[in-house]
Image (cartoon, grey):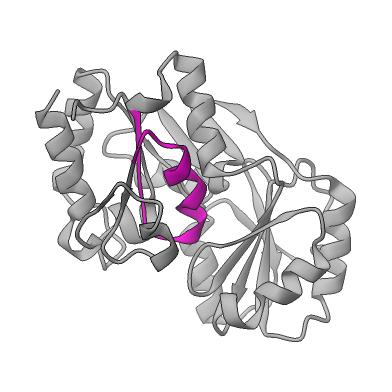
Amino acid sequence: MPCPKIIALDMDGTLLDEHGRIPDAFWELLRLADDREVLVTPASGRQLATLRDMFTTHQPHTFIAENGSVVFHDGRIIDVTAMPEQPVREFLRAFETAPFSASAVLCTPEQSYSLRGASKEVEQEIAKYYHANTNVDSLVDVPFEQPVKVALYVDGDAERDALAWVQAHAPGLDHVVSGQHWIDIMSPAADKGKALLAIADALGVPQEATAAIGDFLNDYTMLQAAGTAVAMGNAHPDLKTVADEVIGTNAEHAAVHRLAAWLSEQ
């Protein structure tokens, strides 16, 4: 098949290896993609500030951050899909008495907030994904604008231990399991697939000329939307059911090899 014109790459479990690093071979491919006018965009549940920090070696033109609720292109945020403020505050208030152990991160387009006093392990986990984070005494009382996501880090298994409670206490919002310990709560109008199609539409690229590679449930809509859908070998079983192709694992740098193969067909 010809090389796609837009390629969306999930980060954790996809582009990043088993140590959480971007493989060295990726950087030359990213430069080659730029030279050939192929848009390679990271598409992640991570914060925009975090993504930009991770790509200091060579900055992509576009980032899909916060699971598609924040889209950055050519130096500026071009789209934000926020949740209504009141349901977010009501959920955060209910979360204070949730029947499972978890920590919440309240996300706005360029800033996040978490409770002061978390364990060292939780603080390290939050710091990994949210570089522009502020510790506060109460999330309910934060004077935030444009809430784009509430991320829960669940001490146990997020899907098993917390998802049903979250669904019951955040009606009208979307609830996505984005990792073994993470649940993301967002606007129903925001997901990686919609962000990918919005970028394609803005650039005049037909859907069939787009591609996406992912590994977990927050990538599901992105693979559904893409002209070519690729699931990692380490992907959630549900993701493999909507993929056109299943490749190797992130430990094998399979996403980088797939990108190289596409660019060789350019």
Quadrant (top left/top right/bottom left/bottom right) for the N terminus: top left
- Res 198 → quadrant: top right
Vertical side of 2 occupied by 110: above or below: below
Q: Is residue 55 visible?
A: yes
- Res 240 → quadrant: bottom left
Q: Is residue 28 visible?
A: no
At x 85%, y 48%, the residue is: 85
User: Residue 33 placed where, x, y %?
Assistant: 22, 27
What is the residue that sits farthest to the left in this orientation?
Answer: 264
User: Residue 97 placed where, x, y %?
Assistant: 83, 81
Front residue of 232 and 246: 246
Residue 106 placement, left or right of 221: right
What is the residue that sits farthest to the top in this orientation?
Answer: 204
User: Residue 166 placed where, x, y %?
Assistant: 73, 70
At x 76%, y 86%, the residue is: 99
Query: What range of the chain is rendered magenta?
Result: 210-228
Residue 66 placement, left or right of 228: right
Residue 20 placement, left or right of 264: right
Any magenta on residue 222?
Answer: yes
Front residue of 137 and 38: 38
Any magenta on residue 96?
Answer: no
Vertical side of 93 occupied by 79: above or below: above
